[in-house]
Amino acid sequence: MTTVPKGFGFAAIEGGLKYTGRLDLAMIVSDRPAATAGVFTTNTFKAAPVLHCRAALERSSRHRAILVNAGSANACTGLDGEKNCRETRELAAKAAGIPADEILTASTGVIGLQFDMEKWRSAVPSLGEQLGKSGPEDVARAIMTTDTVPKLVERTFTLSGGEVHMLGMCKGAGMICPNMATLLSFVCCDVDVDPEHWQAIFAYCADNSFNRITIDGDTSTNDTFIGMANGASGVKAESEEDLRTLCDELLKLSQELAYQIVQDAEGGTKVARIEVRGAADEVDAELVARAIADSPLVKTALFGCDANWGRIMCAAGYSGAQFDAHAVTLEIGGIRIFEKGMPVPGDMDALLEPVMAEQDILISVDLGAGSASAELLASDLTNEYVAINADYRS
Amino acid sequence: MTTVPKGFGFAAIEGGLKYTGRLDLAMIVSDRPAATAGVFTTNTFKAAPVLHCRAALERSSRHRAILVNAGSANACTGLDGEKNCRETRELAAKAAGIPADEILTASTGVIGLQFDMEKWRSAVPSLGEQLGKSGPEDVARAIMTTDTVPKLVERTFTLSGGEVHMLGMCKGAGMICPNMATLLSFVCCDVDVDPEHWQAIFAYCADNSFNRITIDGDTSTNDTFIGMANGASGVKAESEEDLRTLCDELLKLSQELAYQIVQDAEGGTKVARIEVRGAADEVDAELVARAIADSPLVKTALFGCDANWGRIMCAAGYSGAQFDAHAVTLEIGGIRIFEKGMPVPGDMDALLEPVMAEQDILISVDLGAGSASAELLASDLTNEYVAINADYRS
């Protein structure tokens, strides 16, 4: 049973907006204005709900609710899409008795479809009636697209003023690449924190969790990570120590959610942790980590449990990072495979066989060019990924 | 029957170097020193034969022969790999009666394996005996890895001094991404041309053919494009007009070979031509074209014959190029789908169904931000690609 942060209510219904017979429309409501932080996609084609959230967060740092739907992304839908997004907010405001400008929105699903507003108009009143009757698991289920499991993490921790509850949920599965991962993620917390501190903590945690995973290198139009801290616990996070604890807890929660996304990648069977060390600078470290993580040849080898390390070195080599090919070392699962420009002698395939059979695989590259580092979680590339994405719209 | 440029001889044998029961070792020999041009991979991990060719071309612009093997790439093999590469050259020199420093080398196959030199020592003498008995088709077959068909193009054309023959062959299939595509390609021509002109023409043609295709975005360690012009026709290319004709002919030949590589991509069923126009500059045009061409989601939609254009816009949006989302237009197969930030009204799926069913699909994006353009050929991403690459080493 999930411990719910104080002052938050949930609603999830079968809206029939695009899917039938499943939850696809949801709302998270705080009983009071909550300090609200957000991190959004960097894609030039920002979905209407993303444009709206960014504007709303510029206008005010306190909000009451998040309205979210799955099935249609409301991206690449132009001014009509923005108008529809506005109307969904107004419908929700009426149904939940909250001012429309205190409601944030998020959408996921097919790009380029306009909302069917008739369906929204008939669905949203039921959503209002459901408020407080659903649990957070229902919301986590309502936002799934090709996800196979709902993703929910909770944390309870103590600040100097007392106990605080934090709950996070997310959906991922495909179109997942850092900045941001293609994901929706929402965090509710009953801590009382200054909105500026909350946003700073939030951005730091996004950078070190969701922005450090990749499934297919596709950065979506809809990535949205919103956190509401409503203060309903009566516990303040003001001192440096309490803020640090809050940040640590949010980071753990975000990293756990990010891990779950890679673990539930479309068709994925592996979670590879790519560690790059010894880079000349952070940009180079990141270039190498992303080249390895996004290489279809590395990803298919992972799927095949094949310790085809040449593909890893090859990806590092075309990443654009500056390093000397003879200074590089590569380890998989802690086993040194490559150094001084050539393979370490020995029957590596035999040594690596048990390592490659695991779900979690650690790939460590030291470029020998400096002291900067980067880390990424990546999924593999499977038949199932292709099957899902060749068919996804139908 | 292939028309062979004058003065070239071919040898291909079953060397048993890694494969059994197939041609895997070959040689192309000119009966006189030929003006030799080369373009090679930009990967930091350059295979031993690539390092050797670059050094050899710096030393001299005229060479006699190319020695090539399939199965083992001799990449990430360090100093031992370079030593082995040198020995294979010496073996071939003895077998073919050519000075070792006039022989260029190329390899393709698994990265990180050392050559089995015992096998090389016993195979190369047979290769020498085969010289002149094989045809170019045999060489094209010997260099295949996961290619399903040998790739060979010939052209006959007339310069002011008479008729010239040109023959090109290549292998591709996987690890294919521009700069260079993962490929080996060799061109033989009996024209008499100054080595400097030949190299300039060659680099231009590589940029506009092999460097404009992508299969999986993986730039290999071994990409090699070598052209030998031996002058055996007695026809000179000296005048501006003749050089232009020679360049046009080499460009057509290279583009045809590049097309064949995409058509025979590992598991591929489609050839998408991505045209980007209206970019602020060429870098932006290229960024957008590559983001679309390499997006796993675009590639799987192509495989599924699904006109999921939102994924194309999404890729353009995360490419990093600067443009206004409302100024972009998208056409697939000449049908306008997206403009002014939203989809063109109409039943696009029905309209596009016959377009998406074709092998060749034209995707045209106008960014509305300037006048620069770029074009790429790309394959789709299929179950078969995953199956091939999950298993390739075994």
Image (spheres, coloured by chain):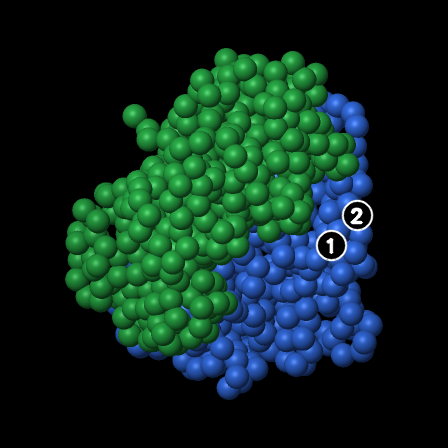
Chain colours: A green, B blue
Quadrant position of residue A304: top left
Q: Amino acid at mark 1?
A: Phe
Report the chain holding disc 2: B
Q: Secondary structure at mark 2?
A: loop
Label at residue B271: none
Residue A197, image x, y percentages:
48, 55
Q: CA distance from mark 1 to mark 2?
A: 8 Å
What residue appears at the point 31 percent right and 56 percent down from the top-left corner? A363
Label at residue B327: 2
Q: Residues within 10 Å of mark 1 (few under 14, many from 20)?
A: many
Pointer 1 residue: B323
Relative depth, front residue between B346 and B383: B346
Residue B295, image x, y percentages:
56, 46
Q: Are marks 1 and 2 in contact (CB under 8 Å)?
A: yes
Residue B112, image x, y percentages:
31, 62
What residue appears at the point 42 percent right and 75 percent down from the top-left corner? A280
